[in-house]
Image (spheres, rainbow, N blue to C red):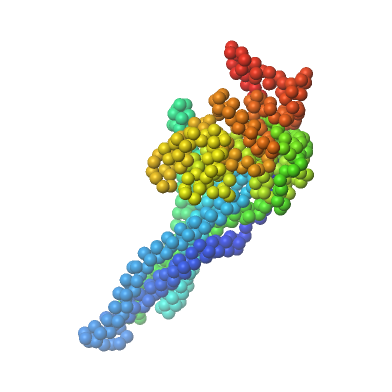
């Protein structure tokens, strides 16, 4: 298969650490500069606060104990401690408030970053012109990881960077103080953090690898939970009694994910146990040593208080910095998935020319196609010419490749061999957007959007307004609905065209419950959506009447015949009566065109498979005793 996007090259280099970091920083900067600046400022305040507090505490203790001055008169002591005590109080208040203000700023920043990241990610996903992205489990896992990491990773990276900066600042301040008391101890405390740093860096890699397994499991779990929690499968789940089975499958996936997470927690514990013991031993030994020096009179009580604060802060700061570096590293590894998906989307710009109106013919030249190299060929040398303005009925048994051919015409995939020519130009040369702008297609598996009736139709041509200036549905929407024979149904809904066609969501403006249309009514809505594009060059209708009752089928068949009259039309149908009026019928069999001609001509051929199928279907309608034949199925 060739997806019309460039398929990811398995050997392609992962984005470099520097590029990933730059993308995260740009994302944070572009999302909310002021919140980012405020966060940086608050980090500086948080970093400086403890150093100032430790220094002021030493001043206070020394003045209270009379150390250094040798005086201890009550009046002068009270006077000399006022300033450091007041300053300490102010610092206390500031440090108590900072986390809340910081929380506010980080909230603003993370929401802005998440919004921007989501916007860029889905812009990139939309830029994929083909469907290959949705049929490749590895790419889907990557997309989910990108979704998760894009939301919070940039902010977490900023936070990690802030922690490193803050810790560095605190460390520098206290290291100076600690070195003044004992350079040896300062060196030991710093050295004690090295094993922890190495352990955390090793963990970051295995955590990032484990996230791939977690993502795949969570995606499968979410498939089952969506089935269980949604309406789509509710009927079959109850009828077949498969709720418990699906629940068990969901829980099995969750348990597998939990096991991976638990393994990670155990790894973290075992990797950190020894380095943490080492650091604590150094802190304890240092404390005993410093206490001994105070009793010997070599250090003041104030010195001891600074020393205690320094040891705690240096170890705490080093610990946070090491964890932040390791976490940052892990976030970068995961964020690389986001960068890959975004860049993958940005790169996929196949074809540069703009498709013009179809004036002469559409030609399929020996088209071969399969969905993947390990899957069988679906099309094995299809050659077909459709003249502009001609209507062609495409028939064939289930799995013959009719819908596949439609997807190739839309350039969701590209032929593995052969070409499709639009007035002599290979479809690959056109931008997918310009080509699709020339088409109006109703897919066999059309979408029922959980939106209002008017929106469901207007989506067919988003360039034109869905509503008139007075708020009523646009005339084109109503005309299309009328033509598709669904206007009376939509007009009679509780809020007319503004009624939500779902019972799963409320509308934008009111909380009236929506409605559920029947399958056939939905099919007409989908037709109306296509009818909004009557000015397009090629109409493709893939089984447009499959859900309709006989009366509706006849009516819709008339609509289809009139639809896009004078334009090129391709109608895929199992109901041969519907395609008989086409200028030509094309039978797809065994991956190739085996019959091609007007209905009468094919009916006159002695060995025509189409004729046999048509007669069999017609006989089924005429003979009440026979079940309706599975014509062309
Ligand atoms: N996305 C896909 N990935 C892999 N194989 C696919 C995919 N879509 C279709 N196929 C396979 O391609 C073959 C042709 O399918 P296609 O839907 O084109 O047939 P069809 O003629 O439209 O059938 P029907 O009459 O049942 O709609 C089938 O064997 C199907 O299993």
**Total numbered circles:** 0
Quadrant where the N terminus is found in the figure: top right
Q: Nearer the viewer, residue 309 or 564?
A: 564
Quadrant of the image occupied by residue 410: top right
Is 203 placed above or below 257 here?
below
Q: Residue at 71% across / 48% down in the picture?
A: 355
Q: Image height check: is 281 above or below 527? A: below
Q: Is residue 2 visible?
A: yes
In the displayed structure image, the side of residue 292 where residue 200 appears, left or right: right
In the image, residue 105 sits, relative to residue 466, either above or below, namely below
Q: Is residue 24 above or below residue 12?
A: below
Q: Residue furthest top?
A: 625
Residue occupying image coordinates x 61% and y 30%: 558
Residue 200 % position (x, y): 50, 59
> Which residue lies at the image location 28% right of the left edge and 84% below the top edge?
80
Q: Is residue 214 toward the left or the right of residue 346 in the image?
A: left
Q: Is residue 219 visible?
A: no
Q: Quadrant of the C terminus?
A: top right
Left/right placement of residue 277 relative to residue 393 reads left
Q: Position of residue 238 (x, y in %)?
A: 44, 29
Q: Residue at x 74, y 21 (%)?
A: 603
Locate residue 212, reporting x and y percent.
Answer: 55, 48
Q: In x, y percent, where is residue 454?
A: 50, 42
């Amino acid at each position: 298969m060739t997806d019309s996007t460039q398929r990811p090259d398995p050997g392609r280099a992962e984005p470099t650490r520097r590029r990933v970091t730059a993308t995260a920083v740009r994302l944070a900067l572009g999302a909310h500069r002021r919140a980012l600046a405020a966060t940086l400022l608050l980090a500086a305040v948080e970093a400086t606060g403890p150093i100032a507090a430790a220094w002021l505490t030493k001043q206070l203790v020394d003045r209270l104990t009379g150390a250094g001055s040798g005086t201890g008169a009550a009046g002068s002591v009270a006077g000399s401690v006022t300033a450091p005590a007041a300053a300490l109080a102010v610092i206390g208040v500031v440090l108590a408030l900072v986390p809340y203000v910081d929380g506010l700023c980080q909230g603003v920043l993370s929401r802005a970053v998440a919004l921007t990241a989501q916007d860029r990610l889905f812009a990139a996903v939309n830029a994929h012109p083909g469907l290959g992205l949705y049929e490749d489990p590895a790419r889907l896992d990557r997309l989910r990881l990108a979704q998760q990491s894009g939301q919070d990773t940039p902010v977490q990276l900023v936070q990690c960077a802030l922690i490193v900066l803050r810790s560095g600042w605190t460390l520098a301040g206290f290291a100076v103080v600690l070195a003044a008391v004992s350079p040896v101890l300062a060196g030991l405390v710093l050295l004690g953090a090295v094993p922890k740093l190495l352990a955390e860096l090793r963990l970051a890699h295995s955590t990032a690898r484990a996230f791939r397994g977690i993502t795949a499991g969570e995606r499968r779990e979410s498939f089952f939970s969506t089935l269980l929690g949604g309406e789509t499968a509710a009927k079959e789940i109850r009828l077949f009694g498969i709720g418990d089975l699906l629940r068990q499958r969901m829980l099995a996936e969750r348990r597998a994910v939990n096991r991976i997470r638990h393994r990670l927690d155990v790894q973290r514990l075992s990797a950190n146990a020894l380095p943490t013991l080492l650091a604590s031993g150094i802190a304890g030994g240092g404390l005993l040593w410093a206490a001994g020096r105070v009793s010997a009179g070599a250090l003041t009580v104030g010195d001891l208080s600074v020393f205690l604060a320094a040891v705690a802060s240096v170890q705490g700061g080093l610990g946070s910095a090491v964890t932040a570096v390791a976490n940052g590293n892990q976030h970068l590894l995961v964020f690389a998935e986001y960068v890959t998906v975004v860049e993958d989307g940005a790169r996929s710009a196949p074809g540069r020319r703009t498709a013009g109106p179809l004036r002469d013919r559409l030609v399929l030249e020996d088209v071969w196609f399969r969905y993947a190299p390990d899957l069988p060929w679906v099309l094995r040398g299809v050659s077909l010419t459709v003249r502009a303005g001609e209507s062609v009925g495409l028939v064939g048994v289930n799995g013959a490749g009719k819908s596949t051919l439609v997807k190739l015409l839309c350039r969701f995939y590209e032929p593995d061999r052969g070409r499709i020519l639009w007035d002599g130009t290979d479809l690959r040369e056109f931008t997918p957007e310009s080509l699709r702008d020339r088409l109006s297609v109703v897919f066999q598996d059309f979408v029922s959007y959980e939106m209002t009736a008017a929106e469901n139709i207007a989506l067919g041509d988003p360039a034109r307004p869905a509503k008139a200036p007075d708020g009523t549905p646009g005339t084109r929407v109503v005309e299309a609905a009328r033509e598709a024979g669904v206007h009376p149904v939509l007009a009679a809904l509780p809020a007319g065209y503004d009624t939500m066609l779902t019972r799963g969501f409320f509308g934008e403006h009111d909380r009236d419950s929506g409605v559920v249309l029947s399958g056939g009514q939905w099919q007409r809505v989908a037709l109306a959506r296509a009818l909004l594009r009557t000015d397009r060059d090629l109409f493709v209708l893939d089984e447009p009447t499959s859900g309709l009752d006989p009366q509706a089928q006849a009516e819709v068949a008339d609509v289809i015949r009139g639809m896009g009259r004078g334009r090129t039309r391709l109608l895929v149908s199992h109901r041969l009566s519907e395609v008989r009026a086409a200028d030509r019928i094309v039978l797809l069999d065994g991956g190739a065109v085996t019959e091609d001609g007007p209905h009468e001509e094919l009916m006159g051929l002695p060995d025509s498979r189409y004729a046999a199928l048509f007669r069999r279907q017609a006989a089924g309608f005429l003979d009440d005793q026979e079940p309706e034949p599975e014509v062309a199925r």
